[in-house]
Structure formats: C-alpha cells, structure tokens
Image (cartoon, grey):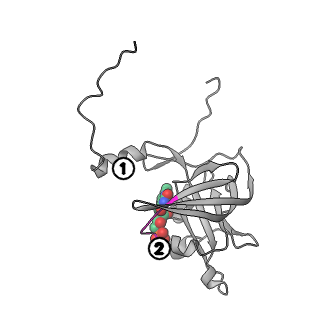
Amino acid sequence: MTVTQHIGPDLAPASDAAALRAAYSCFPSGVVAVCAQDPADADSRELIGMAASSFTTVSLDPPLVSVCVQNTSSTWPRLRGAHAVGVSVFAGDQSLLCRQLAGAAEHRFDGITPLLADNGAVFVPDAAAHLSCTIHNEIQAGDHTVVLLEIETLRADPTVEPLVFHASTFRALEARRGD
Ligand SMILES: Cc1cc2nc3c(=O)[nH]c(=O)nc-3n(C[C@H](O)[C@H](O)[C@H](O)COP(=O)(O)O)c2cc1C
C-alpha cells in the first residue's frame, strides 16, 4: 500500500487573488508577440500587436496553438478582425521588446523594423519562431478568451535561446546535460 500524508491546513482558497496569481506565476512559459496590420486602417498601414505569455501549443493536425487574452484588452478586438495574425516567439535577448509590446500602444513597434507577410501578418524580427495564423475559434473562459489559432505557414529555429517568463521576471533556460 502507498503511504500518504495529509497536505496540511494551509491551502488557500482560489478566491485569494494574491495566492492564485502567485500559483500561476510558478508556471514558466515562453512569451510571444501577436501582431497584424490594422484591417480597419489599411491605408496608413498601422501595426497592432501585444505580448502574451499564455501561448500554448495545442494540436499538430490541424496545426493549432492558443493564447488567452484578457477581456479588457483593447488590442485584441482590433487583431481579431485581421485577415491573419503573426505569432513571434521572443528570443532570449528580446525582454525589453517584449515589455514594449505590452506597453503604450503607440510605441509598441518603436526601434524595430517589423516583418510583414502578404496576408497582413506582422512579425518581430530575430524571433525564435514565426507562425502565420488565422483565427480558428474563440472560447469565452472567465475574464479571458481562449483564442485558438491555426498555423498556415511558419519558420522556426530551435537553436535560438527563447525568452522565459516566470514569477513576473524574465529568465533564461539552462541546458542540463545528462538529465
Ligand atoms: C510578459 C507579459 C505577458 C503577457 N501575457 C499576456 C497574455 O497572455 N494575455 C493577455 O491578454 N495579456 C498579456 N499581457 C499584457 C498585454 O501584452 C497588454 O499589455 C495588455 O493586453 C493591455 O494592452 P491592450 O489594451 O493594448 O491589449 C502580457 C504582458 C507581459 C509583459
């Protein structure tokens, strides 16, 4: 018989917002930029985009990935109208750019030359991966919307060090030989 012990009395209720945020922050993730040309503004070619650490790979066939977007986002309602969105997986040395893409909307593309695909998807240069996607589905989930994105075309370089977000801080990965 397997021996167990009681977990103890110190489990916080999920209604404890600070405990919930702390628990979520324990889970390390990569960070992506989700960007497109504003479809309502093709003449001025205004670019829109946001950083998201909620990116997850979902399915190989069909090729699906997801991001979770806060329902308060002012950028997502514009992005979702785009013909295609570009997902760029931030490289390890792009933490400042990542913060910029979460900051003041009018300065999100300052100092970089974004890459534009024919379908209107927009990418951050020098990212570890570029995924050109269309919106497959959106699922309301509490105060966020789970967005399923279907990849149409892509390029990726797994030798590029990725940016890692953990406990509200950007970190780097360390390869552990022999584990
Ligand atoms: C590291 C990092 C990760 C983020 N991840 C998400 C995310 O997964 N989903 C989301 O809706 N916003 C995320 N944000 C916030 C957005 O990038 C952006 O700041 C927010 O959507 C408000 O801007 P908006 O009103 O233009 O959408 C993240 C910000 C940072 C700095």
> Is 108 on the left or on the right of 122, as rendered?
left
Q: Nearer the viewer, residue 13 or 46?
A: 13
Q: Would you say the beta carbon of the disc 2 residue lies within 8 angstroms of ligand 1?
A: yes
Q: Nearer the viewer, residue 156 or 67?
A: 67
Residue type indicated by callout 2 = Ser
Q: Measured from the top left, where is residue 48 in percent x and y? A: 58, 73
Q: Would you say the beta carbon of the disc 1 residue lies within 8 angstroms of ligand 1?
A: no
Query: Which quadrant is the N terminus positioned in?
Result: top left
Q: How would you rate the neighbour count of disc 2 (Cα within 10 Å): few for under 14, some for 14-19, many for 20 or more?
A: few
Residue 98 among those drawn in magenta: no
Q: Measured from the top left, where is residue 72 in percent x and y? A: 42, 69
Quick one: SS at disc 2?
Answer: loop
Query: Looking at the image, which residue sits at the far left?
Result: 9
> Is 101 on the left or on the right of 84, as rendered?
left
> Is 121 on the left or on the right of 168, as rendered?
right
Residue type indicated by callout 1 = Arg
To which quarter of the image does residue 129 belong? bottom right
Q: Which residues, given as a range, are shown in magenta?
A: 68-74
At x 71%, y 45%, the residue is 158
Quick one: SS at disc 1?
Answer: helix
Question: Would you name the residue on which mark 1 appears?
Answer: 21
Question: Would you name the residue on which mark 2 appears?
Answer: 74
Question: Is tag 2's residue or tag 1's residue first in the polypeptide sequence?
Answer: 1
Q: Measured from the top left, where is residue 110 in percent x and y? A: 59, 71
Residue 69 among those drawn in magenta: yes
